[in-house]
Amino acid sequence: MTQVWYRFSTLIVNLAKSKEIVCYNPRAIPAFIPSPIFGIERVSSVKLLGVYIQENFSREMHFKHNTVSSQRLHILKTLKRQGLKLELLRVCFML
């Protein structure tokens, strides 16, 4: 059904970059889960505009990634304040 819709709407879909996520209420048993779209990977979580969205609407993954990012940023700020050279800061950033 979905494949037919985007063909008739002249929408160009890049299958290599597209992901499908089926969201559901975690308290209710899903009565109907549509079959996957041919050529598009179905995932349980996706990052969209910097926000992690999970199929069960949990915020756990988003908080986990934000915590790790905050810790890394704190380490880089601390190393910069202690006078570490810019080249070495870049090496630390890439790790």
Image: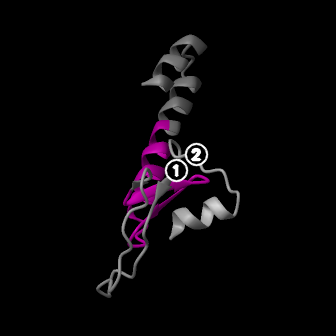
- Residue bearing the label numbered 2: 14
For the C terminus, the image quarter is top left
Seen at 38% across and 63% down, the residue is 36
Mark 1 is surrounded, within 10 Å at the Cα level, by few (under 14), some (14 to 19) or many (20 or more) other residues, namely: few
- Helix, strand or loop at label 1? It is loop
Q: Are marks 1 and 2 in contact (CB under 8 Å)?
A: yes
Depth check, front residue: 23 or 89: 23
Residue 89 coordinates in the image, percent (x, y): 53, 19
Looking at the rendered structure, the kind of residue marked 1 is Ser
Looking at the rendered structure, the kind of residue marked 2 is Asn
Residue 13 coordinates in the image, percent (x, y): 60, 50
Mark 2 is surrounded, within 10 Å at the Cα level, by few (under 14), some (14 to 19) or many (20 or more) other residues, namely: few
Q: Is residue 54 left or right of residue 29?
A: right
Residue 53 coordinates in the image, percent (x, y): 48, 63
Q: Is residue 13 magenta?
A: no
Depth check, front residue: 89 or 17: 17
- Residue bearing the label numbered 1: 18
Seen at 42% across and 69% down, the residue is 22
Q: Residue furthest left?
A: 29
- Helix, strand or loop at label 2? It is loop
Quarter occupied by residue 24: bottom left
Check the image and report above or below for 53 versus 89: below
Seen at 54% across and 16% down, the residue is 84
Write the start and end of the magenta stretch as one range. 43-72
Depth check, front residue: 51 or 13: 13
Quarter occupied by residue 77: top right
